[in-house]
Amino acid sequence: MIELPEAITIAGQMNEALTGRRIASGTQGNSPHKFAFYTRSAEEYEQILAGRTVGQAVAHGSRIVLALDPDYALVLGEGGERILLHDSEATLPKKHQLLLRFEGGGALTVSISGWGAAQLFTWSELEAHPYAGRVGVSPLEVAFTFDYFDGLFGTLGPDDPTSVKAFVISKPGVYGVGNGYLQDILFRARIHPRRPARLVDADERRALYGAIRETVGAAVTLGGRDSERDLYNQPGCYHRILDSTAVGQPCSVCGAAIEKIQFLGGSVYFCPRCQT
């Protein structure tokens, strides 16, 4: 799943390789997918995409917003999208849910695993969209101060059941952070994912803030997780501390066996001794 570090990596590569390129043709791909989300019919995609010039790509949280000049935007990411640039037709995947061919050669494909999106908006449509158009404060921005982060806890009532997991990745959420990076963030902060967020004290909030900045910053520097692929089908270099391979292995801090549970629709990994 694409999260902020992967979105930043891919957007940067798009800007280096695609800005100024003209689209010869574009389609919704060759394989219908029940959970591939579009905003227009296949015929409209073909009509709109052909002849557009690629502008700048920007990472908005876990989404990549690619300008198609003069007046459209293609929104990708925040799901199981594999976004690849191809020099040769021979490297195109057998199944894909978006295909852009460029004048002078080359193509971009989006293949979706699980669920994902390849949505076309006018800029005014995108700005008005309640979800795709949402722009938050990235944990790498200057505006993401401790005071800003601490203020998010003010949304919690005295009996609010919201867990720390939900607080970080969903409601209110840290922009661009999902379950993929949550495990390392909470491990570094020494907080159990099921702990009610309202019970996180001042020192723990400071630790959680630092863990978010440290984890996301390191992952961006390293081009995303090693389980994800960039525009050139190369893995990132960020190796997660806690993932499926860590289950049963000794904690690097205390030696306790790392555990796994299913919680809020996904797997979470944690040290039962360090994280409380």
Image (spheres, rainbow, N blue to C red):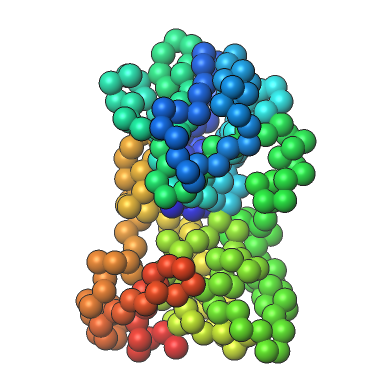
Report whether 164 appears left or right of 255. right
In this rendered view, identify the residue nearer to me: 195 or 256. Answer: 195
Q: Residue at x 42, y 61 (%)?
A: 180
* Residue name at image x 35 percent, y 86 percent: 272
Q: Is residue 20 visible?
A: no
Q: Position of residue 8 (x, y in %)?
A: 51, 45
91 w.r.t. 50: above or below: below
Depicted 275 relative to depicted 20: above or below: below
- Pinpoint residue 196: horizontal percent, then vertical percent: 57, 84
Above or below for 68 versus 224 = above
Q: Quadrant of the C terminus?
A: bottom left
**In the displayed image of the protein, which residue is found farthest to the top?**
104
Q: Image quadrant of residue 258? A: bottom left
Count of labels shown? Answer: 0
Q: x and y percent of residue 221 in the render? A: 43, 51
Q: Residue at x 58, y 16 (%)?
A: 50
Q: Nearer the viewer, residue 131 or 230?
A: 131
Q: Position of residue 56 (x, y in %)?
A: 60, 31
Q: Is residue 95 above or below residue 166?
A: above
Please identify the quarter of the rendering in which residue 52 is found: top right
Q: Nearer the viewer, residue 215 or 83?
A: 83
Relative to residue 188, is residue 67 drawn left or right?
A: right
Residue 242 seen: yes
Q: Residue furthest left?
A: 249
Residue drawn at x 72%, y 76% as measured from the top left: 155
Compared across the picture, whether 37 is left or right of 269 comes to right
